[in-house]
């Protein structure tokens, strides 16, 4: 599904290397988690994959189902099935949440050569998805993320994911700013989307999100590289001993 | 103060060979007085305090620059509404294209008909509010209009008509040079919605004098467009009685030069005046100027100015807005905001917000901002699959929404919003 090969990335504006050769392969149907200390490059990886400005790829590459996604515009990556759940979802005053979602869905469908979804069908779809995430009609009417609590913003990200049905989902610290109940709700939303055709890359600092979204593979990232890969146990080890042991062991 | 020679010369050049239109005694007197005002003030010059950002040359030139017609190939705005429709073709009333001038709750007739009669209610208003609006800031093009206009409407609102009065200004001649003058009197407790739409002429000078009696209400919504080469200078002069309401919204798209002046005088307690505008300018051949002057001269009045401009490809936007609170006008609530969204480095927004307050118990605020598109929001939209141009349009529309929200009638706001979406593409 997602193949990242020897990916080197630096900041566009300054000569600072952030990713120093990331190799990662996420198969369809699998959940991969990336853990790592602050500043290890986890969020940069998610931004580079989704097409945010400000980064320059100096070496290596990334493909989604064989397509070179780094050569695509952000909207083309989305239409190709890539989705990033933002660590800090953006507030957009003046744009209604419903309008936003419908515009996004239909833009993707159009890009894929599919029929646009009618207003009635869309309403039905969104009501059904919103209900399971406990998002009420009021929240759907409000401008995108404006005045939303931290938990509401993250639930809104998962709602977008549920509506857009991407093939490859990247979750960037989706657990940050969530209380226990909200984390459960968000995790249930993610788990409901797990199926044999979809891949997940879950970026997190803490093991506790992985109690709810159980990964198949866990990677430890440090200083711009994946330094260790293992099963779910690796996350537990980090939770218990911190990153220090692993960093020493690899060094 | 003596008028500088250069202004005198320009004024006389403009007036050369012009004869004042004929009419009843009161009309002739009003025109002569207006012409005297023009000479006294002189036509605008680039050195005048309120003409520094907008060149008046083409507005005062003896010959109007020609303006190519633009057929957008779209259904006219407001066309689907239940309305009293009145058509002016290059500034001339078109009886055949208009509905009969009859509507329960208003008296309405053509200005030229009113001016032919010796006794008419409009005699107390024609040129009167315009003349009041000349101090402290001169508005000579409005006085020129009072002197020369022969067509327009006089409307006396006595009830609450079920339908809006909807004026369509068609532009059929590339060289039309037009003065149109409306006089509107809203009687106590009466209420009217007035709609205006269309490019009107190659060079269009319009004055609207609005006198709203106690507890009267006037809603005014206009759309100026869409010919690229048209020029327009408009003056709205409103006087508000106690507890009355005046709400005016203007949408401007295209046009090589537009200057909209709005002069509002709150003379009765508890009156409310809202004036708002949204404009969308694309290209170096777009210049749009809102010049607003609100005078609070009564207790507990509210005024709002909300102006939003989206400028791209070298377009220029100007805002000059003032709130003047006179010494007795306690409990004034005055608000003014002007904002521009500059979609590139070539476009510019020139703003001159002013407050002048002589009362000590008032709440007045003003703000002016210029900004680029929010890159973070743009990326968020694109990351969800919305193409860049469409995402930009969505953010532009969101920016203009605050001004469009000033329109009380949701269905009108919606109609304008829908139309705006189609107008993002300049030539579409």
Image (spheres, helix red, strand yellow):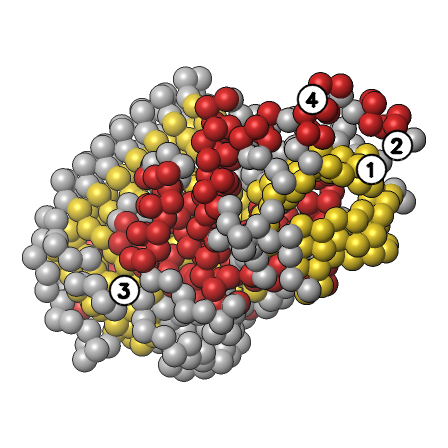
For the residues labelled 2 and 3, the Cα–Cα distance comes to 72 Å
Whether discs 2 and 1 lie on one chain: the answer is yes
The answer to whether the residues at label 1 and label 3 have Cβ atoms under 8 Å apart is no
Between disc 1 and disc 3, the foreground one is 1
Residue bearing mark 4: A239
Task: Give the chain letter at badge 1.
Answer: A
Q: Secondary structure at mark 3?
A: loop
Residue bearing mark 2: A250
Q: State how many labels appear.
A: 4
Q: Residue at x 56, y 40 (%)?
A: A90
Residue bearing mark 3: B78
Q: Residue at x 57, y 28 (%)?
A: A211
Whether discs 4 and 3 lie on one chain: the answer is no
Comes first in the chain, label 2 or label 1: 1
Residue bearing mark 1: A227
Q: Residue at x 76, y 21 (%)?
A: A242
- Whether residue A106 appears in this view of the structure is yes
Task: Give the chain letter at badge 3.
Answer: B
Q: Secondary structure at mark 2?
A: helix
Whether discs 2 and 4 lie on one chain: the answer is yes
Observer-nearest of B334 and B3: B334
- Whether residue B59 appears in this view of the structure is no
The answer to whether the residues at label 2 and label 1 have Cβ atoms under 8 Å apart is yes
For the residues labelled 2 and 1, the Cα–Cα distance comes to 7 Å
Q: Position of residue A241 (x, y in %)?
A: 76, 19
Task: Give the chain letter at badge 4.
Answer: A
């Amino acid at each position: 599904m997602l193949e990242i090969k020897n990916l080197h990335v630096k900041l566009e504006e300054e000569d600072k290397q952030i990713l120093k050769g990331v190799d990662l392969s996420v198969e369809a149907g699998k959940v991969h988690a990336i853990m790592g200390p602050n500043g290890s490059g986890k969020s940069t990886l998610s931004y580079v994959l989704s097409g945010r400005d400000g980064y320059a790829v100096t070496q290596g590459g990334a493909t989604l189902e064989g397509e070179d996604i780094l050569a695509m515009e952000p909207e083309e990556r989305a239409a190709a099935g890539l989705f990033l759940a933002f660590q800090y979802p953006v507030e957009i005053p003046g744009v209604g949440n419903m309008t936003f979602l419908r515009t996004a869905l239909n833009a993707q469908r159009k890009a894929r050569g599919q029929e646009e979804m009618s207003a009635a069908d869309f309403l039905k779809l969104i009501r059904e998805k919103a209900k399971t995430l406990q998002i009420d009609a009021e929240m759907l009417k409000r401008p995108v993320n404006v005045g939303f609590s931290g938990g509401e913003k993250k639930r809104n990200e998962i709602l977008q994911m549920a509506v857009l049905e991407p093939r490859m989902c990247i979750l960037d610290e989706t657990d940050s700013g969530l209380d226990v109940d909200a984390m459960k709700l968000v995790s249930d939303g993610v788990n409901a989307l797990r199926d044999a055709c979809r891949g997940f890359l879950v970026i997190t600092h803490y093991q506790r999100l992985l109690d709810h979204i159980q990964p198949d593979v866990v990677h430890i990232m440090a200083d711009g590289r994946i330094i260790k890969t293992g099963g779910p146990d690796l996350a537990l080890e980090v939770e218990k001993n911190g990153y220090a042991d692993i960093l020493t062991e690899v060094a | 103060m003596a008028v500088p020679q250069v202004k005198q010369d320009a004024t006389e050049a403009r007036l050369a060979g012009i004869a004042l239109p004929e009419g009843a005694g009161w009309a002739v007197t009003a025109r002569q007085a207006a012409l005297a005002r023009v000479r006294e003030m002189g036509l605008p010059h680039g050195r005048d305090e309120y003409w520094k950002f907008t060149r008046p040359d083409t507005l005062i030139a003896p010959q109007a620059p020609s303006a190519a017609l633009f057929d957008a190939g779209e259904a006219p705005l407001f066309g689907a509404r239940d309305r009293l429709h009145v058509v002016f073709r290059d500034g001339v009333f078109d009886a055949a294209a208009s509905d009969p001038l009859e509507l329960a709750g208003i008296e309405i007739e053509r200005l030229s008909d009113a001016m032919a009669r010796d006794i008419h209610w409009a005699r107390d208003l024609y040129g009167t509010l315009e003349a009041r609006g000349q101090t402290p800031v001169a508005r000579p093009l409005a006085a020129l209009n009072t002197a020369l206009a022969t067509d327009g409407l006089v409307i006396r609102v006595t009830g609450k008509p079920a339908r809006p009065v909807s004026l369509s200004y068609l532009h059929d001649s590339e060289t039309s040079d037009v003065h149109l003058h409306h006089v509107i009197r809203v009687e106590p407790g009466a209420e009217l919605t007035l709609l205006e739409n269309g490019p009107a002429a190659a060079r269009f000078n319009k004055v609207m004098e609005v006198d709203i009696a106690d507890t009267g209400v006037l809603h005014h919504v206009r759309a100026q467009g869409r010919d690229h080469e048209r020029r327009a200078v408009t003056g709205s002069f409103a006087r508000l009685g106690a507890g009355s309401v005046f709400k005016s919204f203007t949408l401007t798209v295209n046009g090589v030069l537009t200057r909209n002046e709005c002069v509002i005088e709150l003379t009765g307690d508890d009156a409310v005046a809202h004036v708002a505008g949204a404009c969308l300018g694309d290209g170096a051949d777009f210049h749009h100027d809102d010049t607003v002057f609100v005078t609070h001269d009564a207790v507990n009045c509210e005024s709002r100015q909300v102006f939003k401009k989206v400028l791209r490809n070298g377009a220029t936007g100007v805002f000059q807005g003032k709130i003047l609170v006179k010494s007795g006008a306690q409990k004034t609530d005055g608000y003014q905001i002007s904002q521009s969204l500059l979609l590139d480095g070539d476009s510019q927004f020139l703003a001159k917000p002013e407050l002048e307050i002589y009362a000590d118990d008032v709440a007045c605020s003003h703000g002016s901002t210029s900004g680029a598109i929010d890159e973070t929001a743009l990326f968020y939209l694109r990351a969800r699959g919305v193409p860049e141009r469409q995402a930009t349009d969505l953010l532009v529309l969101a920016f203009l929404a605050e001004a469009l929200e000033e329109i009380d009638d949701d269905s009108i706001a919606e109609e304008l919003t829908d139309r705006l979406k189609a107008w993002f593409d300049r030539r579409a």
